[in-house]
Image (cartoon, grey):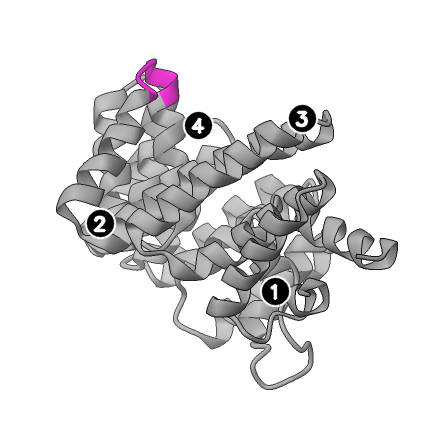
Amino acid sequence: MNGFIVNIAISVFLILFIPYDTVAVANPAHPGQPTFSAKQKAEFLLVRKQYEEAILAYQSLLKEEKGDSALFRGLVKAYEGANKLKDAEGYIKDYLSARAGSSAGQYGLGYFYYLSGQDTEAKVRFEEAVRLEADNALAWNNWGASLSRTKSYTLAVEKVKEAIHLKPGNSMYYNNLERIYGEMGSAGLFLADYQRYVKNGPRFVAQGYGRQIAKTLRQEAFKQYSQGKLDDAVKGFEKIVVIFEETGYRAGLVPIFFGLAVLHEENGDEKTAQKYLKEVLAINPNHIQARGMIK
């Protein structure tokens, strides 16, 4: 394999360590195309730290659409980024003055209080948000996060698990749950939850837990890689393969197999590298980098 292809491979390998959600939000496909919605534009501005523009974008959405909690979350974060967090309180209170029954608005005000460190006020608003709309997963999740700051860990776990039950595809909730378990001094409970869902299902919840565990393993593997410990990095990726295979998360195997191919190639094991490239192409025959490296 020539050096040019190796450099491409290593670059792609490094990309593997960027969190899934960051990639999805920070690089929306085909800007300007019809699929690039007004909400995606607001999210993009927020990720790009164009906070003033993001505030206006979110405010426009809240005028035009029925408010949802994700819009309020983005709006408050934009205010925070612009060093105008206090202004968010006034805007949301004005919104609620005409829409007191808005679960999303109550969540937005609670999120403002949460970011301001006012946990008592935040919990009141999150509780009201879920009273108004029992399936407001963001409110359940942030309610749990707020409870954890006051060391009410048992209740915090209960609230975050409700968020996972409602929206099992949202990685933020698993990340929050793992953090709370860690603060409790019971980090092993996250793995125990994962193993229980692997055994009993539902599979898509097991995948959510598995992806969170894989993220931690990926970060550790990158650390090992950066220290030149290629064998240890390989072991980390192999653990991820086990997790994705036992949860049936086949799509997640593509970047992991490709990462293993790159690691083995750099480690001088051409035969094993080619084996993993074939694994990649068996799942995704159009994988450009793998096709360029295969022999």
Question: What residue is at 22 percent from the left and 56 percent from the top?
Answer: 133
Three-letter amino acid code of the residue under disc 1: Ala
**Residue 101 locus on image (x, y percent):** 27, 59
Three-letter amino acid code of the residue under disc 3: Lys
Q: Nearer the viewer, residue 247 or 171?
A: 247
**Residue 162 locus on image (x, y percent):** 22, 44
Which is more N-terminal, label 4 or label 2? Answer: 4
Which is more N-terminal, label 2 or label 1? Answer: 1
Three-letter amino acid code of the residue under disc 2: His
Which is more N-terminal, label 1 or label 4? Answer: 1
Q: Nearer the viewer, residue 249 or 295?
A: 295
Question: What residue is at 59 percent from the left and 75 percent from the top?
Answer: 286
Task: State if disc 1 and disc 3 touch (CB < 8 Å).
Answer: no
| Residue neighbourhood size for the residue with mark 2, other residues' Cα within 10 Å, grouped as few (<14), some (14–19), many (≥20) | some
- The alpha-carbon separation of the residues under discs 3 and 2 comes to 39 Å
Q: Please, is residue 64 above or below residue 224 in the view?
A: below
Residue numbers of the magenta segment: 182-187
- The alpha-carbon separation of the residues under discs 4 and 1 comes to 27 Å
- Residue that label 4 marks: 118
- Residue that label 2 marks: 165
Question: What residue is at 41 percent from the left and 65 percent from the top?
Answer: 67
- Residue that label 1 marks: 42
Q: Say which quarter of the image contains residue 179.
A: top left
- Residue that label 3 marks: 229
- The alpha-carbon separation of the residues under discs 1 and 2 comes to 27 Å
Which is more N-terminal, label 2 or label 3? Answer: 2
Residue at disc 4, secondary structure: loop
Task: State if disc 2 and disc 1 touch (CB < 8 Å).
Answer: no
